[in-house]
Amino acid sequence: MTDLKSLADAIIKGNQDAAKTITSSALDEAIAAKDILDNGLIAGMNVIGERFKKGEVFVPEVLFAARAMKAAMEILEPALAKAGVKPIGKFLIGTVQGDIHDIGKNLVAMMLKGAGFEVIDLGVDVSPEKFIENAKSANVSLIGISALLTTTMPGMEKTLKALKEAGISAKVMIGGAPVTQSYADKIGADGYAADAASAVDLAKALVA
Ligand code: B1M
């Protein structure tokens, strides 16, 4: 009988092959897809998220874990869809207009996927119009904007204002190295997170 703890361990270690093999065996043994997701994949990503927050692991370990999670998800997704398992929220994310930094944003996106969100990643240099268009067409519950430059931070305020004017009701959270909670408060964002693991905690709180 497949032990889902071993799947969580494979994710934590970033062992892609083991994650795929254990996911396949668990499905063969008719273990519920949701159980595999919650107690294997998400459990492993949660551990990595906590360790990252505490500074016990760094960006490469998180990237390896996310890559293993992605590989296992490709096997699990058809079973999840068949079982009618819904994501915990739809999250639209992008780096603000004028800014092409995406390493941190990608980490946040991966961790959100790992936590069970459906993530639509618009990439970098995203205009307010593109955020609006996609927020409307995908009917998302949350929007995340990342900025790495002090010079592009005002684009976050501009995007927030444009989203409000367009009548988008999704909550908006922001982050990135120069961004702070007080900046988020100042521009009226619904939340700020300092790192990818905190972004997951915040996203969960905002959709709760
Ligand atoms: Co750029 N760059 N860069 N750069 N770059 C910085 C940011 C800089 C601090 C370097 C420096 O001068 N010391 C500086 C900004 C100064 C400032 O504005 N205060 C800078 C500059 C000036 C520039 C250029 C203007 C340089 C030039 O051309 N003259 C130029 C800008 C181009 C543009 O965007 N238009 C530029 C270009 C580049 C590269 C293309 C070479 C490359 C980007 C590659 C890429 O992203 N694909 C690059 C890089 C790599 C950096 C540094 C070295 C590393 C950034 C990074 O990826 N960190 C950076 C200096 C540094 O930080 N040491 C620097 C790792 C990443 C995991 O952390 O992105 O902070 P971070 O993400 C964290 C959190 O912030 C948070 O979670 C993540 C994980 O914990 N987070 C969120 C991020 N987004 C979030 C969203 C959330 C929540 C949390 O909710 C939605």
Image: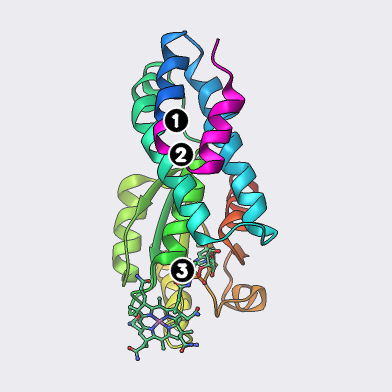
Q: Which mark is residue 18?
A: 1
**98 or 16: nearer the viewer:** 16
Marked residue nearer the N-terminal end (1 or 3): 1
Hey, what amino acid is under mark 1? Ala
Labels 2 & 1 near each other (Cβ < 8 A): yes
- Report crowding for label 1: few under 14, some 14 to 19, many 20 or more residues within 10 A (C-alpha): some
Quadrant of the rendering where the C terminus is positioned: top right
Q: Which residue is mark 3?
A: 146
Residue at screen point 60% across, 73% down? 184
Q: Which residue is mark 2?
A: 15
Q: Secondary structure at mark 3?
A: strand
Marked residue nearer the N-terminal end (2 or 3): 2
Segment colored magenta: 1-19
Labels 2 & 3 near each other (Cβ < 8 A): no
The x and y percentages for residue 60 are 48, 58
Hey, what amino acid is under mark 3? Ser
Hey, what amino acid is under mark 2? Asn
